[in-house]
Amino acid sequence: MKIKTADFVISNSDVSKCPKERLAEYAFIGRSNVGKSSLINMLTGQNKLAKTSGRPGKTQLINHFKINNNWFLVDLPGYGYAKVSKSVKKTFQSFIKNYFLQREQLICSFVLVDCRHEPQKVDLEFMEFLGENEIPFCIIFTKSDKLKLSELNRNIKNYSKKMTSTLWEEMPQYFITSATSTAGKEELLNYIDIINQQLEKTS
């Protein structure tokens, strides 16, 4: 799939104010310094679609972008290490949770993980929340250009071991990406395209 159009539609912190259209939504979320905005810009081919910043926590609302007039890419606030007040972080957690639990248009969530680091508790806990609530998700390993291939493979293997040694029977579907080299772009967009085609057949 090629993204021909990517248009900003709305930002808000209330799931009831999200777009009413019955289009498939794919949500992107991760820790606040994982490179989410850069990845979204890489996928859409628009350098300024999602706001990037050297300061973690730039995204603070539910952001809807309509892709090819056919589906929504949803950019969600990062969790974890954003330098915001406890009250603001609590608000984040509240409306993020509401989005995942209430948004019927949500088809799949992509949890972004920095491939350079060991499995982080906050990431594992968030994936546990998705699993407990039967919300489909995939993992996106970001910043793959920062590691040698052998290091990358070792880290992903360790991630798989960590997940399957706790709550998971197997490692979820995952993608290896780099906003710098565009690695993983085609695979990720094709995955979304296949789901969209399946949805069209059943609608």
Image (cartoon, grey):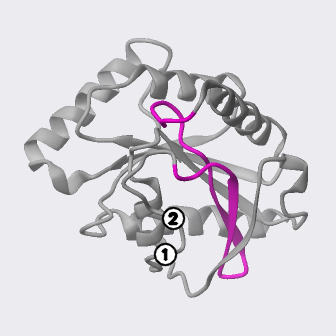
**109 relative to 154 in the view: left or right:** right
Q: For the residue marked with disc 2, what is the amino acid?
A: Lys
- Relative to residue 2, is residue 98 depicted above or below? above
Seen as rendered, the residue at the extreme top is: 166
Image quadrant where residue 3 sits: bottom right
Query: Dot 2 lies on which element?
Result: loop
* Crowd tier of the residue under label 2, counting other residues whose Cα lies within 10 Å: few below 14, some 14–19, many 20 or above: few
**138 relative to 14 in the view: left or right:** left
Q: Position of residue 156 (x, y in %)?
A: 26, 36
Seen as rendered, the residue at the extreme front is: 85
Image quadrant where residue 75 sits: bottom right
Marking on residue 100:
none
Q: To which residue does mark 2 refer? A: 51
Which region is colored magenta? 58-84
Foreground residue among 179 and 68: 179
Please say if the residues under marks 2 and 1 sit with CB atoms less than 8 Å apart: yes
Image quadrant where residue 130 sits: top right
**Residue that appears at 61% across and 85% down:** 5
* Crowd tier of the residue under label 1, counting other residues whose Cα lies within 10 Å: few below 14, some 14–19, many 20 or above: few
**Residue that appears at 49% across and 30% down:** 80
Foreground residue among 58 and 17: 58
On whether residue 192 falls in the magenta region, the answer is no
Q: Position of residue 190 (x, y in %)?
A: 49, 68
Q: To which residue does mark 1 refer? A: 48
On whether residue 80 falls in the magenta region, the answer is yes
**Residue that appears at 70% across and 70% down:** 71
Q: Position of residue 95 (x, y in %)?
A: 76, 38
